[in-house]
């Protein structure tokens, strides 16, 4: 539906943009929930052959457990971000049509369409198309404010994205040359650990790491996310980086499961551990709130890479299932927590006219809901109960300890402590007395409640039982 709405938006222009986007995102949420219910009810994935042409000539869209999960998460966050940006990108009556409004709403629909394609495609080239659409829809959101700083951030994002795309495309060319197909199920059935396949897997992996912003490929993410408007930052941090991460999971768990050697997976986990520690320490040193939240994203992404070493080739036992569940809970909990936190950071800048951390004093008295939103989001990022972040990190920690991975267990604990340090440092500033008298802008309660609502989802997830979730296992290709 977002793709159809995007075509309508281009034809009808910016004055009808908000209503078209609202209708499309509401319908997307309905479809996503319906798909999730059908997958859960049948305990089997849903598949649709586009145009009736069977693979390898045709395209098959497939929704398994994690696909359906991410479709619902994406739909909710896009709807929340659009509601938050409703007034920011409105067309003024009696005024010429604003180009920025049309750009923002078009980019939002394009990102939603691209993510749906990534979550449901079963062909490596179609996944490449979705990945590129996602990237080139996100870059205008980064640069939409204009100015030298945001343009530099967008250009850096573009350079990293092109680098990642070239490597990914080269990798799938090698795969097609070796197997004559790009269908995930067909490749998984005949994959061999030959030189071409190993090289292809390496190229694709590095390309996707660059797009996911895993350390040391994270340099584009903080300035890009910090420079975008609040609603754009929420979508970029919560969802856009998850698109390439989702594809990376598809690659190693569905396309090349037999190639997952322990040493290679330990390398991915090691990079994840570096991201957790370095991202958290760097967040502590940031003078601006949005930059702190952006570096927190770098750190939180790192946790998701422990799953590559905690779920061995011979998956199926309770420990592997717990690690698999914990990784996806981390993906979802981080999405909602970070969406709420970026929206809260945007409201802070709107109230105070800046987001300098040292000058946040008095905010708790003037905007208590904003402070509460930041605190709730931080609860999940720290991994404290009750929160989805706690459930996710506890299951990853339990799996690491059960499998004897003491280093990863230590990093998980240390990351939570460091997250607590930067979250409480910001909260202390927010609750302090004002450093100087200032005239504060007023903000609407509706937008505060939207941010609080998204953040609250990450906490409500903590009420789920701490055991593997069968829904996440539905339809895994192997």
Image: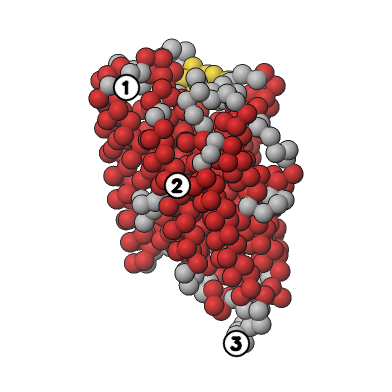
User: Which tag is nearer the camera, tag 3 or tag 1?
Assistant: 1
Instruction: Provide the secondary structure element on which disc 2 rests.
Output: helix
User: Which tag is nearer the camera, tag 3 or tag 2?
Assistant: 2
In the shown orientation, is residue 368 left or right of residue 253?
Answer: right
Decide: marks 3, 1 in contact (CB < 8 A)? no
Q: Vertical placement of 311 versus 236: above or below?
A: above
Residue 57 in percent (x, y) is at: 37, 15
Q: How is the image coloured?
A: secondary structure
Residue drawn where x is 57% and y is 31% of the image: 320
Question: Residue 148 falls in which quadrant of the image?
Answer: bottom left
Mark drawn on residue 394: none
Q: Say few, some or many: other residues with alpha carbon within 10 Å of mark 1 (under 14 / 14 to 19 / 20 or more).
A: few
Decide: marks 2, 1 in contact (CB < 8 A)? no
Residue drawn where x is 36% and y is 52% of the image: 216
Mark drawn on residue 436: 3
The residue closer to the viewer here, 69 or 415, is: 415
Q: Quadrant of the N terminus?
A: top right
Q: Say few, some or many: other residues with alpha carbon within 10 Å of mark 2 (under 14 / 14 to 19 / 20 or more).
A: many
Q: Earlier in the sequence, mark 3 or mark 1?
A: 1
Residue 73 in percent (x, y) is at: 60, 40
The residue closer to the viewer here, 136 or 271, is: 271
Instruction: Provide the secondary structure element on which disc 1 rests.
Output: loop
Residue 299 in percent (x, y) is at: 49, 54
Distance between mark 3 and mark 1 Cα atoms: 65 Å
Per the image, the residue denoted by label 1 is 193
Residue drawn where x is 32% and y is 22% of the image: 193
Q: Earlier in the sequence, mark 2 or mark 1?
A: 1
The residue closer to the viewer here, 290 or 308, is: 308
Instruction: Provide the secondary structure element on which disc 3 rests.
Output: loop
Per the image, the residue denoted by label 2 is 272
In the shown orientation, is residue 286 left or right of residue 264?
Answer: right
In the shown orientation, is residue 330 left or right of residue 195?
Answer: right
């Amino acid at each position: 539906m977002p793709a159809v709405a995007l075509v309508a938006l281009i034809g009808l222009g910016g004055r009808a943009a908000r209503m078209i986007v609202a209708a499309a995102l509401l319908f997307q949420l309905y479809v996503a929930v319906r798909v999730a219910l059908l997958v859960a009810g049948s305990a089997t994935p849903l598949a649709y052959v586009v145009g009736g042409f069977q693979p390898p000539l045709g395209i098959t869209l497939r929704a398994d457990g994690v696909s359906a999960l991410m479709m619902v998460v994406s739909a909710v966050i896009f709807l929340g971000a659009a509601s938050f940006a409703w007034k920011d990108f409105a067309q003024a009556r009696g005024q010429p049509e604003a180009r920025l409004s049309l750009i923002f709403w078009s980019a939002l629909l394009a990102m939603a369409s691209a993510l749906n394609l990534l979550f449901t495609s079963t062909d490596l080239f179609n996944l490449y198309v979705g990945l590129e659409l996602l990237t080139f829809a996100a870059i205008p959101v980064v640069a939409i404010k204009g100015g030298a700083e945001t343009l530099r951030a967008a250009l850096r994002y573009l350079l990293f994205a092109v680098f990642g795309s070239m490597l990914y495309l080269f990798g799938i060319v090698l795969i097609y040359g070796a197997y004559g197909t790009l269908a995930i199920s067909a490749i998984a059935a005949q994959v061999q650990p030959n030189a071409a396949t190993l090289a292809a897997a390496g190229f694709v992996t590095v390309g996707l790491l660059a797009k996911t912003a895993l350390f040391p490929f994270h340099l584009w993410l903080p300035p890009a996310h910090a420079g975008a408007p609040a609603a754009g930052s929420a979508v970029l941090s919560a969802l856009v980086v998850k698109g390439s991460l989702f594809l990376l999971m598809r690659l190693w768990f569905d396309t090349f499961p037999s190639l997952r050697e322990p040493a290679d997976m330990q390398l991915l986990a090691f990079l994840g551990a570096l991201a957790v520690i370095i991202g958290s320490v760097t967040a502590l040193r940031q003078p601006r709130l949005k930059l702190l939240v952006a570096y927190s994203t770098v750190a939180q992404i790192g946790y998701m890479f422990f799953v590559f070493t905690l779920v061995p080739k011979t998956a199926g036992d309770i420990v592997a299932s717990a690690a698999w569940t914990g990784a996806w809970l981390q993906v979802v909990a981080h999405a909602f927590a970070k969406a709420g936190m970026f929206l809260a950071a945007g409201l802070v800048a709107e109230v105070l006219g800046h987001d300098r951390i040292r000058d946040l004093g008095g905010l708790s008295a003037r905007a208590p809901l904003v402070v509460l939103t930041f605190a709730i989001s931080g609860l999940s990022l720290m991994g404290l109960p009750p929160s989805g972040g706690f459930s996710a990190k506890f299951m990853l920690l339990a799996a690491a300890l059960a499998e004897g991975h003491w280093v990863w267990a230590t990093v998980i604990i240390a990351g939570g402590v460091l997250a607590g340090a930067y979250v409480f440092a910001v909260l202390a500033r927010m609750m302090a007395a004002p450093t100087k008298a200032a005239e504060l802008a007023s903000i609407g309660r509706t937008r505060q409640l939207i941010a609080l609502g998204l953040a609250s989802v990450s906490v409500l997830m903590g009420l789920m039982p701490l055991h593997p979730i069968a829904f996440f296992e539905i339809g895994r290709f192997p």
